[in-house]
Image: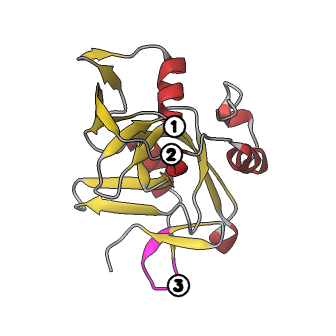
């Protein structure tokens, strides 16, 4: 189960966030391959709300627990998996939402850390890139979190990132984190 960060993400240094993200111990869902058992009757809405049989799951602890056994399959579908069962779960957009960001450094020395709606921590780097989909009028920013799964970057967090855009090596505007450049403009 991942380590839970202190309630005040803003009080953590980026080094502390990176350490906590690296220390997060998640179950080895990529190694579990039970036969498909059915449908969980669960759905993750585009805003990150988890539902079971049409009712919102309001206990954050339950959402955090389920998120640790969430896996994306090769066909793009999502499942909740344990060593003995695998249940389908519907995901409207991305299974996570990046609800808070912490930025430090300038240019190639920049670092961006995120807190997800599940309290999981992630640092943008080459293995966890930021990408922009959609259109200029309606951008959809995402962060790769783990196992082929993304977090939609919440609109206020996206605006915070946009305020820090810099010109990258290819002339496009974007952000640096952990030595990787993430363009916010199309090529």
Front of the two marks 1 and 3: 1
Q: Main secondary structure of the magenta part?
A: loop
Rendered residue at 37%/54% (across/down): 141
Residue at the image position 54 percent from the left and 50 percent from the top = 31
What is the magenta range? 168-174
Give me the residue at 76% from left, 48% from top. Answer: 19
> Are dots 1 and 2 in contact, CB under 8 Å?
yes
Asked which quadrant contains residue 20, the reply is: top right
Q: Residue 154's spot in the image, x, y percent?
A: 40, 41
Residue hosting label 3: 169
The residue carrying pointer 2 sits among few (fewer than 14), some (14 to 19) or many (20 or more) residues within 10 Å by Cα, namely some
Is label 3 in a helix, a strand or a loop? loop
Pointer 2 residue? 32
Could you tell me residue 75's position as x and y percent? 28, 57
Q: Tell me the CA gap for discs 2 and 3.
A: 41 Å
- Report the front residue among 187 and 151: 151
Residue placed under numbered mark 1 in the picture:
83
1 or 2: tag closer to the N-terminus: 2
Q: Give the residue displayed 31% in from the left and 19% down from the top.
A: 52
Task: Work out whether 109 lies above or below 147.
Answer: below
Q: Residue 98 placed where, x, y %?
A: 48, 42
* Looking at the image, residue 70 lies above or below residue 104: above
Q: Is residue 101 visible?
A: yes
The alpha-carbon separation of the residues under discs 1 and 2 comes to 5 Å
Seen in the image, is 124 located left or right of residue 92? Answer: right
In the picture provided, is 27 more to the left or to the right than 5? left
Q: Is residue 35 magenta?
A: no
Can see residue 46? no
Q: Residue furthest bottom?
A: 170
């Amino acid at each position: 189960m991942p380590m839970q960060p202190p309630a005040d993400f803003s009080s953590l240094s980026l080094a502390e966030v990176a350490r906590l993200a690296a220390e997060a111990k998640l179950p080895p869902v990529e190694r579990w391959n039970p036969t498909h058992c059915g449908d969980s009757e669960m759905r993750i809405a585009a805003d990150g709300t988890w539902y079971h049989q049409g009712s919102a799951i309001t206990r954050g602890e339950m959402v955090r627990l389920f998120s640790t056994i969430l896996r994306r399959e090769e066909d793009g579908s999502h499942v909740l998996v344990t060593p003995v069962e695998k249940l389908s779960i519907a995901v409207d957009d991305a299974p996570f939402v990046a609800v808070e960001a912490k930025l430090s450094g300038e240019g190639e020395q920049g670092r961006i850390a995120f807190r997800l709606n599940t309290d999981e921590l992630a640092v943008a780097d080459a293995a966890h890139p930021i990408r922009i989909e959609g259109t200029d009028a309606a951008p959809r920013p995402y962060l790769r979190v783990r196992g082929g799964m993304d977090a939609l970057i919440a609109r206020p967090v996206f605006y915070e990132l946009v305020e820090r855009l810099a010109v990258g090596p290819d002339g496009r505007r974007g952000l640096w984190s952990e030595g990787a450049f993430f363009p916010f403009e199309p090529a």
